[in-house]
Image (cartoon, rainbow, N blue to C red):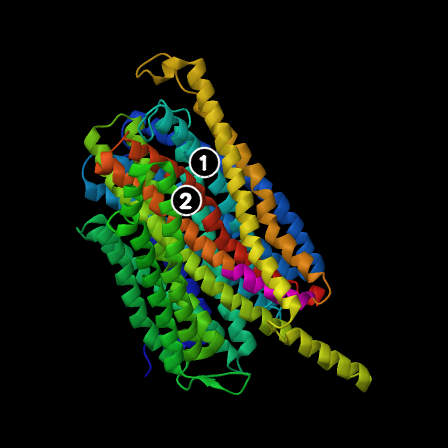
Amino acid sequence: MAFPLASLLLDNGITFAIACGSVSLLFAIWLIKSLLSIPSGTEKMQFIANAIEQGAKAYLSRQLISISTIGVIIAALVLWKKDAPTAVGFVVGAVCSLVAGFIGMRIAVKANVRTAQGARESRKKALVAAFSGGAVTGLLVVGLALISTGAFYLLVLKYAPGKEINSLVGVALGASLISVFARLGGGIYTKAADVGADLVGKVEQNLEEDDPRNPATIADNVGDNVGDCAGMAADVFETYAVSLIGAILVGALTTAAGAAGAAIAYPFVLGGAAVIASIIGVLYVNATNAKPAVALMGGVLVSSVLSAVAFWPITQQFFPAGLAMKDGTTLTMNGIFLSSLVGLAMTGLACWITNYYTSTEHGPVRKIAKASETGHATNIIAGLAIGQQATAPMVLCIGSAIWASHAFAGLYGIAIAVMAMLSMAGIIISLDAFGPITDNAGGIAVMSELPAEVRKATDELDAVGNTMKAVTKGYAIASAGLAAVVLFGSYFVDLQHHLETGLAALAATATPEVLAAAKAKVADTLGFSLNDPKVMIGLFIGGLLPYLFSAFSMSAVGRAAGAVVTEVRRQIAAKPGILIKGGDDKPDYGTCVDIVTKAALKEMIIPALLPLIAVIGVAALPDGAKILGGVLVGSIVTGLFMGIAMTSSGGAWDNAKKYIEDGHHGGKHSEAHKASVTGDTVGDPYKDTSGPAINPMIKVVNIVAIIIIPIFF
């Protein structure tokens, strides 16, 4: 059955997606204007907000210089070893990832002070200000991903036909590599400042959160913006773009002649339709009077239901007779549609599971709070156990999603499930950016000495925002696991295509003996079996990468946090009057900001380049293609488990501390509270540095493997 947009979608599906992305950008601009119309508070509030903004801008500017140098070198290597379209794609992906991060930071620093001002009037106004700021980031990131990927594809199709598919891998590599840098650098910055501020301020000096007497408090608030906002925005842009490109690769490489066009355009159109649904979800959140957590999750539900309704007629129009594949099979229309529903269902399940393990409303967080009564060690033990337990339901759901979508529509079905899941990114990232905005708003309220009821209002929103941050990290890691499976499948499909093309060329000139040996070699390379020790070696190497990556990033946070602790102690010892309210001694915020800025920029380089170096090193080995297949699987499996466990533990530790601060188990300054602060500081790099950064890391491994196939094999 046709519907009004039928011909548009079939003939101009990518153009339709670009148009939807443009609508998303226009709506985000309207939200910005609405946000800026809210007063920015008192002069003191504006002064503090400006200090946070200047610190965030200074860090991102210095990060841009560091990343650009590495990016230029890699772009030159891609140009040398591949071709110009792929190199241009790398630059497009890298620039868009950087822009997404910068936008995320800029909007957050404008929204935080307006959220604090809104809290002076009502909780509803504070909610609208914070969520509008988050929605700008979410919708801009998704719109940018659709526009950049779609426009690049169409331009290469026009000016370099035949290279439009392979060159998209360059876009994915640029986005992923920059995302790793953004996640790592921002994560090291924010958690070094946070840990340093908590250990001296809360544990040693019994200061409140964001007390202006703490010399590290400005650095801590800056970190929320460069880590949670800029880092997450770059991360989700990368995840969205890579998932879209993965679906395009699978559609182009596995479908029969004449069917590839619809298979390529379909994921674009799903993304475009979901953007419109996300806009409606944002409007719902801002209009409803429900409690914050209910309103936010209600927006996700509205967007998901509307997307599901839209996906059915779209699928009908694209595949009325199914989708013909190269192997002679035909995927059914119903199977492809059901695969998209699997992705939407995974969005809800990933959010629900993470919410259960990290929200103060449920048992896991309360168990950690209870364990805090008996000391620091029992708090840590409980938090580690909760994180490891959280892997079970999430991985079972991911496994079920892979099985179901593959049963419905093969590898293409998995790709569509991933794309459907990521199509919700606009509304999901709105929730994520909501968290650091409310956190900063609370900091501004305390440092501006606003009434206690204002801080209470921002604390309530911050507790919800903290859960939302954990929920969206669970969503991002679950989607990354599914996306990595698609990329792994793309690696083998692309490798097979490359080797068989080489055999066809060899057949024209080689002797029968040489050709037979070459065929045997190709069959052996593509025979991915656990009986082969080379595959097992690859599995071990791949499994090692997330552990080594996390070790580098965790150590970086520890070293930088130690430097902050030393500096805060030095300032308090040199100027004890800092601790006297209204005293003449004032803390030097700038030194702490400078310490974490330098540390983050220095420490992010080695772990960010680790996956790139590892893949190229393995590919250079004899039988590197087979070993590399094992590396991809190993990195996906251990990376997925580590990412889920670390983000779940970190979020649960953080909310266990907030639960105690609300008056449970002795309340603030009790022994249980001190133990919970220790757990929170351990969990900080878990949930905001290492855990989330594993997400782009495992995709970098897979993307680099795809891009080097014609170079090494």
- Residue bearing mark 1: 56
What range is drawn magenta here? 624-637
Q: Residue furthest front?
A: 374
Q: Position of residue 59 (x, y in %)?
A: 50, 36
Query: Which of the image's four quarters has the C terminus?
Result: bottom right
Q: Residues within 10 Å of mark 2 (few under 14, many from 20)?
A: many
Q: Is residue 245 visible?
A: no
What element does badge 2 sit on? helix
The local crowd at label 1, few if under 14, some if 14 to 19, many if 20 or more residues have their Cα within 10 Å, is many
Residue 686 at x, y percent in the picture = 44, 45
The answer to whether residue 342 shows anywhere in this view is yes
Q: N-terminal of the two: label 1 or label 2? A: 1
- Amino acid residing under circle 1: Ala
**222 in magenta:** no
Which quadrant of the rendered structure holds the N terminus?
Answer: bottom left
The residue at 50%/56% (across/down) is 639
Q: Circle 2 sits on which residue?
A: 228
Q: Is residue 672 left or right of residue 612?
A: left
